Amino acid sequence: MTRPPMPAHRSDRVSLWKHLAMFRDDILATQPARLYRAKMAEVKLPFLHSVMVNTPELVRLVLQERPQDFPKSDRVREGLRLLLGNSVFVTNGAIWERQRRMIDPAFEGGRLRDTFPAMWDAAQATAARLQQGQVEIEAEMSHAAADVIFRTLFSVPIEDDTAAQVYQSFRAHQRSAPILNPAALVRLPRWMPRLFARETRATAARIRTLITKMTAARMAAIEAGTAPDDLATKIMTTRDPVTGDSFDTEEMVDQVAIFFLAGHETSASALAWTLYLIATHPDWQAQLATEAEALRPHVETGTAPDFGLLKRFPLIRDTFREALRLYPPVPMLVRETARREIFRKRRLEVGAQVIVSPWHMGRHEAIWPDPHEFRPARWQEPATRTHARDGYLPFSAGPRVCTGAGFAMAEAVLILARLLHDWEFWAIPGKVPEPIAHMTVRAREGIWLELRPRAATA
């Protein structure tokens, strides 16, 4: 058994400038280890007052009981505005409510079943693309997750020319985009220019231009009555039941950008860490491979399974849940106070930053038994229901819970089952990934695994 790798933690006391330098490199490294036990943490600077709420009661207050008093922080938008525009990820109030009313129907249960054949095609392509030997699995899962998004959203595989350009441009944008934009620390007037690197601006513009091309083409196909019945068509033809409006092309570009970021980047992170955990626990992997044998008739015939087949993979689903607990793709949820608050005898003025950390809640020592261990069997224990209610937040909670949570779970279970059917995953001695957080929780030098073809069972 191998204990899952942890990030480096800073000491309890560091200078402001060292803290900012560490933050630019990795969000997780700026957090002291005591946060796995603390009830709340506070940072108070002349230009920023921030608290991390670390108890189930405060988390429920912020995300579920009074979410209107803790809207999405404008500071979050500063680093993402070039790419995401006015998408549902960064909006608040009436604009956000309108966007959710138009997006949510596309991810309801029946629609999820409709996307399942496209997910299967992406899983098949991924299993065929992998090769024996040492593989950087983050890159492979990034490719796989992007393929799922393009197939389910626009009915094209990632090999489509425009889809491939979006994917490559997004990877370039990730490398150039800073974690810390100055306007995220010090509130700047809207008219003041934001400091972004030339490459960051160029890649964001390129991505939005390509998405605009795809969206405009789909608008034309809808008007001509020739559009496929996929997620893009569903979202673009859904009218707000309150206003009667639908998304125009510019609004749809914003939403597609966040679908790609949320649906591709977060899924890639979660899948890669799941495969690493599986690789470091070979006995458990053997049980998962036995479960994945339920796919054999479909692998041999090439026919897509029915959505209901996912029920035959409970251990794979629990493995993915456990990976999400240990490595939630989005480690911090940032809100701000809309009115004065008092948290644990600390006064918060309007505009103070309130952080909910899925990373720390998922590993909190007052909530979870053996919180830093990979133990997927815990999800079969009755007590885990209580632990999960208090500290399991990979998809957030409350009104702003991820609308694609069901989509993400179905995609991950299917891809994992399909890969485990064909491949064995082995950890490579000396190549232990170091978790860091930029846009999502990734590994500093990637996640390297050895892949071997799985011998067929009789």
Image (tube, rainbow, N blue to C red):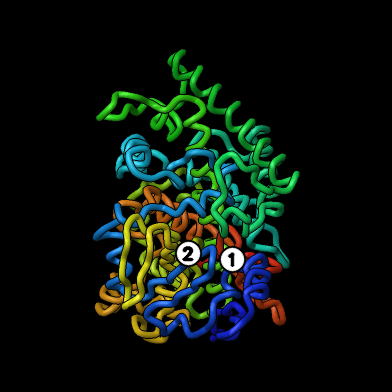
Instruction: Name the spot of residue 140 as percent of width and height, x first.
Output: 64, 56
Asked which secondary structure carries label 2, the reply is: loop
At x 60% / y 26%, what residue is drawn? Answer: 213
Q: Report which residue position mark 2 lands on.
A: 332
| Tag 1 secondary structure | strand
- Direction from residue 394 to residue 104 in the image, left or right: left
In this rendering, position of residue 310 left or right of residue 65: right
Rate crowding at label 2 as few (under 14), some (14 to 19) or many (20 or more) other CA atoms within 10 Å.
many
**Where residue 46 appears, x then y in whole percent?**
54, 67
Q: CA distance from mark 1 to mark 2?
A: 9 Å
Q: Is residue 327 left or right of residue 361?
A: right
Amino acid type, residue under disc 1 in the picture: Ala
The residue at 46%/49% (across/down) is 298
Image quarter of the N terminus: bottom right
Residue positioned 56% across, 53% down in the render: 265
Q: Position of residue 81 (x, y in %)?
A: 56, 44
Q: Amino acid at mark 2?
A: Met
| Residue of label 1 | 437
Q: For residue 381, what is the image quadrant?
A: bottom left
Toward the viewer: 415 or 165? Answer: 165
Task: Report if the CB atoms under discs 1 and 2 are less than 8 Å apart.
Answer: yes
Numbered marks: total: 2
Around disc 1, counting alpha carbons within 10 Å, would you say few (fewer than 14), some (14 to 19), or many (20 or more)? Answer: many
Tell which circle, 1 or 2, labels the residue nearer the N-terminal end.
2
